[in-house]
Image (spheres, grey):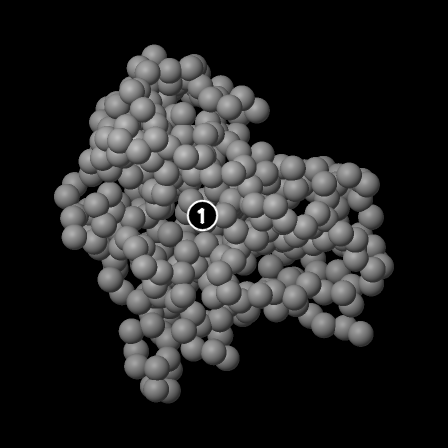
């Protein structure tokens, strides 16, 4: 069976696209370009349509969204915000926006280079025996606080992107984090969230009733894999494994050897311990955690529940499987920040595809992790 792989840096992490079977010759290159296009649209670490929109939202303005990827992402976020009862919310509050504007005025924004150079795509042999090797997320290639590795079977547009009706005075500073409080762990004041946005689908206009900013974070990775998977399916790819940081995964079809793609999600702190093993076919997976190497990085703000501003202090890992990466990303975040009643509702809808593992039990206990709810 023909096989090929692209490995490159995008969206602040390592992306790998593994294709199996015959497809259009340019399928892999087109999928890579698709991921990079999503990065260009949604990044908040350099000039982009998302940053341009944040300028407007930071001063409570309104804008017409011209960039198609940003518009589609906004609609997907809106759908998942409603589906999770507001538990998935990529917005950060107005005080951070105001602070960012002041800081940007005092310290001019220095754009991050477009993307870190990485190896071009390379061909594999014609055998599935050249299965990819997956590096643990603790090596620093996955998104902060979120880890997973996969275990495979072994054998022999526009820059600004919008037209603003309320031009802001300066650029919103980069570095906002998905699912964190605007002031960090010491400030849980009520913040304007996604509910402060008004979206007019007919005119593609978005307006903020209060100052806020958006950070697509891990959601952007799942969304990028969705776009890449759509391109590959159109190109006739029968089987593929796509990963972004190894905590965002999408698979097309079955494993080349038949059956679902086998995935094992490790305990983020205990070597050799697996939280669960899954087999996926035409599905996406996302893992979010409050523990592990990424979550312990200095300066990382606490994770905050969007619905009430409460800081999430439990040590836990959430795993979500869904039809799309955008859904999986939103659900894993929602599972991680949900209170007990909301968690029960989320898991009840798909108990075999939505998990929350608690790590509060002593590591020397017979069961070092427990499935919550």
On the image, which quarter does residue 280 sit in? bottom right
Q: Which residue is mark 1?
A: 218
On the picture, is 74 further left or further right than 129?
A: left
Q: Nearer the viewer, residue 184 or 30?
A: 184
Q: In terms of image quadrants, where is residue 299?
A: bottom left
Image point 54% across, 37% down: which residue?
114
The residue shown at (48%, 61%) is 140
Which residue is at the front of the view, 354 or 153? Answer: 153
Q: Give the secondary structure at mark 1.
A: helix
Residue at the extreme top: 165
Q: Which quadrant: the N terminus? A: bottom right
Q: Residue furthest front?
A: 107
Counting from the top left corner in percent of width and height, residue 341 is at 25, 56
Q: Residue at x 52, y 51 (%)?
A: 13
Q: Is residue 136 above or below residue 312?
A: below
Q: Quadrant of the C terminus?
A: bottom left
Residue 346 visible in this rendered orientation of the protein: no
Q: Relative to 174, does residue 202 appear above or below in the rendering?
A: above
**Percent x, y for residue 142?**
49, 57
Q: Is residue 152 above or below residue 221?
A: below
In the image, taking residue 182 as reference, residue 252 lies left or right, namely right
Q: Does residue 282 appear left or right of residue 205 in this picture?
A: right
- At horizontal 43% and vertical 70% (from top left) the residue drawn is 268
- Total count of labels: 1
Q: Which percent across, then down, holds residue 64?
A: 41, 17
The answer, for residue 373, to whether it is visible in the render is yes
Q: Position of residue 328 (x, y in %)?
A: 47, 50
The residue carrying pointer 1 sits among few (fewer than 14), some (14 to 19) or many (20 or more) residues within 10 Å by Cα, namely many
Above/below status of 30 relative to 371: above
Q: Quadrant of residue 316?
A: bottom left
């Amino acid at each position: 069976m023909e096989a090929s792989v692209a490995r490159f840096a995008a969206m602040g992490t390592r992306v790998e696209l593994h294709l199996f079977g015959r497809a259009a010759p340019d399928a892999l290159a087109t999928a890579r370009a698709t991921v990079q296009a999503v990065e260009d649209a949604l990044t908040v670490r350099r000039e982009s349509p998302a940053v341009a929109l944040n300028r407007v939202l930071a001063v409570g303005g309104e804008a017409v969204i011209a960039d198609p990827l940003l518009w589609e992402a906004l609609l997907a976020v809106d759908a998942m915000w409603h589906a999770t009862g507001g538990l998935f919310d990529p917005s950060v509050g107005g005080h951070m926006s105001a602070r960012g504007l002041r800081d940007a005025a005092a310290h001019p924004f220095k754009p991050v280079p477009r993307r870190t150079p990485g190896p071009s795509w390379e061909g594999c042999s014609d055998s599935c025996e050249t299965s990819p090797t997956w590096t643990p997320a603790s090596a620093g290639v996955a998104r902060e606080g979120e880890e997973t590795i996969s275990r495979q079977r072994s054998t022999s547009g526009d820059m600004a992107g919008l037209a603003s009706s309320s031009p802001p005075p300066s650029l919103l500073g980069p570095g906002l984090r998905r699912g964190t409080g605007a002031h960090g762990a010491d400030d849980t004041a009520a913040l304007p969230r996604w509910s402060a946005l008004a979206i007019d689908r007919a005119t593609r206009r978005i307006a903020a009733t209060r100052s806020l900013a958006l950070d697509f974070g891990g959601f952007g990775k799942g969304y990028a894999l969705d776009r890449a998977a759509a391109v590959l399916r159109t190109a006739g790819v029968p089987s593929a494994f796509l990963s972004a940081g190894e905590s965002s995964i999408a698979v097309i079809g079955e494993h080349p050897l038949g059956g679902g793609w086998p995935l094992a999600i490790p305990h983020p702190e205990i070597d050799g311990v697996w939280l669960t093993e899954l087999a996926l076919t035409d599905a996406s997976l996302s893992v979010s955690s409050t523990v592990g190497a990424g979550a312990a990085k200095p300066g990382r703000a606490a994770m905050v529940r969007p619905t009430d501003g409460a800081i999430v202090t439990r040590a836990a890992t959430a795993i979500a499987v869904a039809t799309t990466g955008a859904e999986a990303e939103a659900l894993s975040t929602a599972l991680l920040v949900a209170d007990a009643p909301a968690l029960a509702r989320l898991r009840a809808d798909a108990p075999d595809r939505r998990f929350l593992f608690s790590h509060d039990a002593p590591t020397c206990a017979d069961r070092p992790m427990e499935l919550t709810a």
